[in-house]
């Protein structure tokens, strides 16, 4: 994030994804890891100005030696923020990825209800999106797989799962973690090769050295594919703008990033994207 106050950009992203309605409650899924603690800090800050209650939800699967330590970290974060912490310890029949995921989401829905919240916010990031899209691609997938992790979905009766930082990176959230001074835990299972997702991380780290915008690009691509599948207003506006440029034989001269930037500008102004804007001065993809 650029500028002297990077938290303002983080706040804007999270605020746009979550409903900070006075008197409401938001449940933040907090594993104790750096990303989830950073998200808890951002949501806590925004909630104080909006008079919204925040509840931290921790799911302790008990399958790792450090599980109790992670729980203690979350309790410490809750104490530092002055927020309630609700903990679930689900009984597991298996400890494979699918079983852990299903148990975690079921527990989060139950904790949200217990906390009076209708939203559960998780700290999935652009790196998580990259891994998900690649795993789907390696298995052989269609458009649904390329759309990756959805930014929001129903989690249970009256409960919605929201991923407000899905297009942000670990590095961007790390700025919030440093600013907050909150404790966090590092999950050693992230390096265990028995989990397929972990086998991608070392090769991806090498690729990121050559392609620093890799995760942003994949996250943006996944969002575009999902928009096309769902037929969103943005997808229709993108298609209309590209069709206009193509009809004028100008599409090949317009960088993709310029089209997306103009769509962003139109969304902020609640207007239609302007054809002449994308055919103007050379575009700086770093902006």
Image: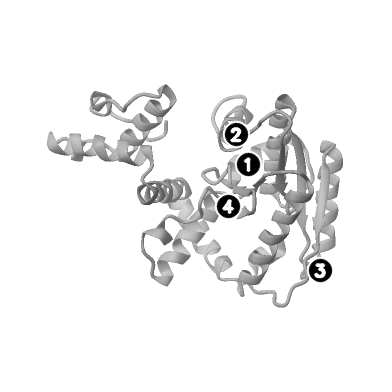
Distance CA(mark 3)–CA(mark 2):
33 Å
Label 3 vs 2, first from the N-terminus? 2
* Residue 7 image point, x, y percent: 63, 30
Distance CA(mark 1)–CA(mark 4):
25 Å
Q: Which residue is mark 2?
A: 10
Q: Residue at x 42, y 45 (%)?
A: 220
Which residue, as the protein is rendered here, is positioned at the far bottom?
93
In front here: 41 or 98? 98
Q: Which residue is mark 4?
A: 154
Label 3 vs 4, first from the N-terminus? 3
Callout 4: 10 Å neighbours few (<14), some, many (20+)? few
Tell me the quarter of the image containing the N terminus: top right
Camera sees residue 186: no
Helix, strand or loop status at disc 3: loop
Mark 3 vs mark 4, foreground winner is 4
Distance CA(mark 3)–CA(mark 1):
26 Å
Check if mark 2's residue and mark 1's residue have beta carbons within 8 Å.
yes
Left or right: 60, with 248 as reference point: right
Identify the image quadrant of residue 232: top left
Helix, strand or loop status at disc 1: helix
Q: Which residue is mark 3?
A: 65
Mark 2 vs mark 1, foreground winner is 2
In front here: 122 or 168? 122
């Amino acid at each position: 994030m650029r500028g002297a106050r990077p938290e303002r950009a983080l706040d804007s992203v999270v605020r746009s994804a979550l409903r900070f309605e006075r008197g409401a409650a938001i449940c933040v899924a907090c594993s104790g890891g750096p990303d989830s603690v950073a998200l808890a800090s951002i949501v806590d800050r925004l909630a104080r100005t909006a008079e919204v209650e925040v509840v931290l939800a921790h799911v302790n699967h008990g399958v790792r030696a450090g599980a109790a330590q992670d729980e203690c970290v979350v309790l410490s974060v809750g104490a530092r923020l002055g927020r309630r912490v609700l903990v679930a310890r689900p009984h597991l029949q298996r400890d494979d990825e699918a079983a852990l995921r299903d148990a975690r989401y079921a527990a989060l829905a139950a904790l949200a209800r217990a906390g009076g919240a209708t939203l559960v916010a998780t700290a999935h990031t652009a790196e998580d999106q990259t891994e998900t899209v690649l795993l789907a691609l390696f298995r052989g997938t269609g458009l649904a797989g390329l759309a990756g992790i959805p930014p929001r979905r129903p989690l249970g009766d009256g409960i919605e799962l929201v991923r407000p930082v899905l297009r942000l990176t670990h590095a961007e959230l790390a700025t919030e973690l440093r600013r907050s001074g909150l404790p966090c835990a590092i999950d050693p299972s992230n390096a265990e090769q028995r989990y397929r997702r972990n086998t991608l991380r070392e090769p991806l780290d090498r690729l990121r050295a050559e392609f620093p915008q890799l995760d942003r690009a994949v996250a943006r691509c996944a969002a575009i594919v999902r928009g096309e599948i769902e037929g969103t207003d943005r997808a229709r506006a993108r298609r209309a703008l590209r069709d206009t440029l193509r009809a004028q034989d100008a599409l090949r001269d317009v960088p993709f990033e310029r089209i997306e930037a103009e769509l962003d500008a139109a969304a902020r102004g609640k207007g239609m994207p302007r054809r002449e804007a994308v055919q103007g001065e050379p575009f700086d993809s770093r902006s």
